[in-house]
Image (cartoon, rainbow, N blue to C red):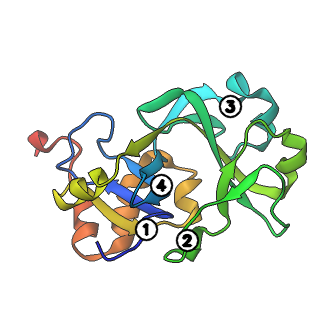
């Protein structure tokens, strides 16, 4: 792979990826290290559980839809949050993503320390999304999956991470790429019904 880091990019599941954990998933890569592996969150899997039911103090800051997202199959009992800064300086409890030299479109997105009192950080955020769990790959594992044809790697924009229509995100991201990937976006959810 030509890029030194996938941080700030999207992994879009190809139609060949049948693993139910990642079928038609759109994963935002939070950290990608050649020696430590890759960490990301699935951004198109909203749950029916509201943020208010789990983290009441953060509910006023949660972006629409204000629900918990299923971030991935690892650590599903733990919360992870992403926030987008407005014009203000980075507040206590907001941490920028590392290695964003490739994709500045998401430079204002960072991780949120949910132990920080929301009143300290909340007003500095334009958007906030909370995830239960994450997706993780050990060193070299993701690259092997990409080479096998399981994932498309595309640049992310902030509207992907904080999409108002997460259920439509898989097709929207692919369509935006144009060419063959736009054609893939029309691939039926169940090809046997064709």
Q: Secondary structure at mark 2?
A: loop
Q: Earlier in the sequence, mark 2 or mark 4?
A: 4
Give the image location of residue 159, x and y in percent.
Answer: 57, 61
- Badge 4: few (under 14), some or many (20 or more) residues near its Cα, within 10 Å? many
Give the image location of residue 111, x and y in percent.
Answer: 65, 51
Q: On residue 100, which mark appears?
A: 2
Which mark is in front, 4 or 3?
Answer: 4
Give the side of residue 85 with respect to residue 136, left or right.
right
Which mark is in front, 2 or 3?
Answer: 2
Which residue carries the number 4 mark?
A: 28
Q: CA distance from mark 2 to mark 3?
A: 28 Å
Q: On residue 51, which mark appears?
A: 3
> Which residue corresponds to the image point at 45% horizontal and 59% vertical from the top-left?
32
Q: Quadrant of residue 105?
A: bottom right
Q: Secondary structure at mark 1?
A: loop
When the figure is inspected, residue 21 is found, relative to residue 41, above or below; the finding is above
Give the side of residue 144 with respect to residue 160, left or right.
left
Q: Secondary structure at mark 3?
A: helix
Q: Is residue 186 visible?
A: no
Q: Quadrant of residue 10?
A: bottom left
- Badge 2: few (under 14), some or many (20 or more) residues near its Cα, within 10 Å? some
Which residue carries the number 1 mark?
A: 5
């Amino acid at each position: 792979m030509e890029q030194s880091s996938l941080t700030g990019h999207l992994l879009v599941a190809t139609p060949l990826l049948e693993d139910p954990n990642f079928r038609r998933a759109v994963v935002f890569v939070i950290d990608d290290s050649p020696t430590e592996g890759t960490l990301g969150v699935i951004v198109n899997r909203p749950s029916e559980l509201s943020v208010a039911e789990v983290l009441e103090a953060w509910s006023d800051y949660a972006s629409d839809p204000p629900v918990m997202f299923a971030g991935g199959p690892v650590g599903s009992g733990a919360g992870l949050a992403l926030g987008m800064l407005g014009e203000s300086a980075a507040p206590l409890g907001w941490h920028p993503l590392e290695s964003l030299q490739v994709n500045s479109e998401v430079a204002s997105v960072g991780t949120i320390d949910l132990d920080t009192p929301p009143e300290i950080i909340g007003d500095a955020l334009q958007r906030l999304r909370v995830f239960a769990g994450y997706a993780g790959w050990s060193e070299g594992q993701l690259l092997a999956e990409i080479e096998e044809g399981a994932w498309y790697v595309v640049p992310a924009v902030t509207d992907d991470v904080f999409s108002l229509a997460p259920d439509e995100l898989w097709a929207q991201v692919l369509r935006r790429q144009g060419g063959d990937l736009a054609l893939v976006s029309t691939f039926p959810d169940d090809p046997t019904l064709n």
